[in-house]
Image (tube, rainbow, N blue to C red):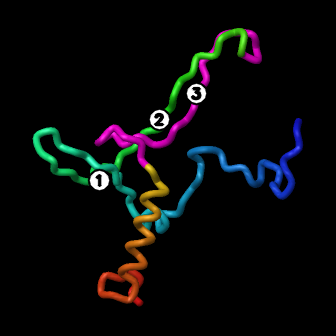
Amino acid sequence: MPKPPPNVPPITPSNMIPPGQVNFSKEAINSAIEMKCLNEIKFNDSDEIKICGGQIFVEAARLRYISPIMSPTGQQTVATINVGKLCITCGKIFQPDEWLKKHHEEEKATKGTILDKSGK
């Protein structure tokens, strides 16, 4: 088994979190902010553009056929390449980094105003 690169701790059962098995407290879930899709939707009958606002996402993947010549097993196979979260409302890939950037900008803009949710 290859060694991890320098400055990267090895993966051990104690620091490994299986997907879908993180247990958040009820308080953490209740105080969490709902992420909404920021993709733009253009309507065919006009030049009006709206922000999607979808809140339900599914995992999206690309499939690649690997020929037996290129496969490490010598057998044809299909490789799955995860591409992210797909918004089911608009059908486009959701960009969580863009959402976080916008969220932080909004927090900065409202800090110290009546819209400040921190109460300070």
Q: Is residue 76 magenta?
A: yes
Name the amino acid type tagged 3: Thr
According to the image, label 3 marks what residue?
A: 80
- The alpha-carbon separation of the residues under discs 1 and 2 comes to 18 Å
Tell me the residue at 33%/87% (across/down): 113
Q: Is residue 14 magenta?
A: no
Name the amino acid type tagged 2: Ala
Q: Tag 1 or tag 3, which sits nearer the N-term?
A: 1
Residue 37 drawn at (x, y percent) = 35, 52
Query: Tag 1's secondary structure?
Result: loop
Image-quadrant location for residue 1:
top right
According to the image, label 1 marks what residue?
A: 53
Q: Is residue 73 above or below residue 113?
A: above
Q: Is residue 3 left or right of residue 109?
A: right
Mark 3 residue crowding within 10 angstroms, few (<14) / some (14–19) / many (20+): few
Q: Nearer the viewer, residue 98 or 118?
A: 98
Q: Is residue 38 left or right of residue 47?
A: right
Residue situated furthest left in the rendering: 45
Name the amino acid type tagged 1: Gly
- The alpha-carbon separation of the residues under discs 3 and 1 comes to 28 Å
Mark 1 residue crowding within 10 angstroms, few (<14) / some (14–19) / many (20+): some
Residue situated furthest front in the rendering: 47
According to the image, label 2 marks what residue?
A: 60
Q: Quadrant of the C terminus?
A: bottom left
Q: Tag 2 or tag 1, which sits nearer the N-term?
A: 1
Instruction: Assess whether mark 2 and mark 1 are in contact (beta carbons under 8 angstroms).
Output: no
Query: Tag 3's secondary structure?
Result: strand
Q: Is residue 72 above or below residue 62?
A: above
Residues rendered magenta in the picture: 71-94
Tell me the residue at 17%/43% (across/down): 43
Q: Is residue 44 left or right of residue 54?
A: left
Q: Is residue 13 left or right of residue 108?
A: right
